[in-house]
Amino acid sequence: MSNVLATIIDEKHLEVRALAKAHSFAVLDQAAKAASTVRGFAAALKRDSMAGYGLIAELKKASPSKGLIRADFDPAALAAAYAAGGATCLSVLTDRKWFQGAPEYLVAARNAVSLPILRKDFMIDPLQIVESRAMGADCILLIMAALDDALAAELEACAMEYGMDVLIECHDADELARAAKLRSPLMGINNRNLKTMEISLDVGVAMLPHLPDDRIAIAESGLFTTADLAQMAAVGARCFLIGESLMRANDVAAATRAILVNPAPRF
């Protein structure tokens, strides 16, 4: 790891230590087991991708590369707008420093809608997984660029133990080969290089055709138009994770409907 991703992961280690001091595993485990019933994230994407395409609509206030994306950020209202626009699932950023997110945003979004929700953060420790379920997350993200194989498998197993789904994210062929050894059916190809924050749809074009047939292929980052979706669909994407372009819209529900009105042709 290097550059932006390495810096973020270093800070996550500090966050995990602070989390462990504030809450014991037993306390978080009890809260996780008492949390509201898990909503099927993978099942929802599979359902919508069989009929057309699945959309993971992201609540993202800011990012390291773009700075502030949406000043008027009401997570409950935005979640409701995404639901009204036809989103399949939601993704909520909970990283405070780099994305101006918060766990409270996930809680507010989940209370506002019935859609399954991904906790979008940088997972490096089982304690974060248990915390995710305690706050109501239905799915967690594993970024292969930030994890070795043993830790990725451990975190995946922990999430599944609590009934959550797991989105495994890759950016290159080596990460894809490693991810294929895991059990989750959800595999995302991130067009963004998290080390440099640069985006190229060529990443998806090159990698999506090589996903195992039994995985649900999700294209992530740099998707702004139906033409972008069509380009990803042409090489195998069946679901899309879209944040910035929808977050910048004045009418989020209308923008969500618009990008879903003419689904990209299936190939």
Image: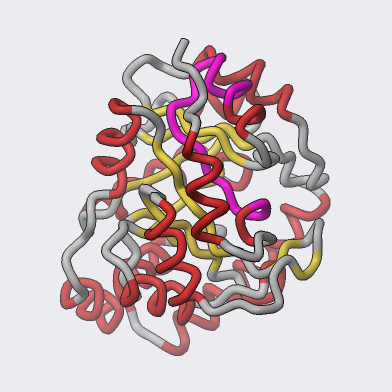
Name above or below for residue 24 compared with residue 158.
below
Name above or below for residue 6 compared with residue 186.
below
Q: How many marks?
A: 0
Front residue of 75/197: it is 75
Could one spot residue 123 in this view of the protein? no
Residue 224 placed where, x, y %? 68, 41
Front residue of 43/7: it is 43
Residue 44 position by quadrant = top left
Residue 17 placed where, x, y %? 54, 77
Residue 34 placed where, x, y %? 16, 77
Residue 190 placed where, x, y %? 62, 37
In the picture, the quarter occupied by the N terminus is top right
Q: Is residue 56 left or right of residue 6?
A: left
The residue at 39%/61% (across/down) is 126
Q: Is residue 199 left or right of residue 168?
A: right
Colour mode of the rendering: secondary structure
Residue 128 position by quadrant = bottom left
Residue 63 position by quadrant = bottom right
Q: Farthest residue in the bottom direction?
A: 22
The residue at 68%/34% (across/down) is 191
Q: Farthest residue in the top direction?
A: 267
Q: Is residue 204 left or right of residue 213?
A: right
The residue at 47%/18% (across/down) is 211
Could one spot residue 17 in this view of the protein? yes
The residue at 43%/24% (across/down) is 180
Indicate whether residue 235 is drawn in magenta: yes
Specify start and end residues of the magenta stretch as a single range.
230-245
Front residue of 209/232: it is 232
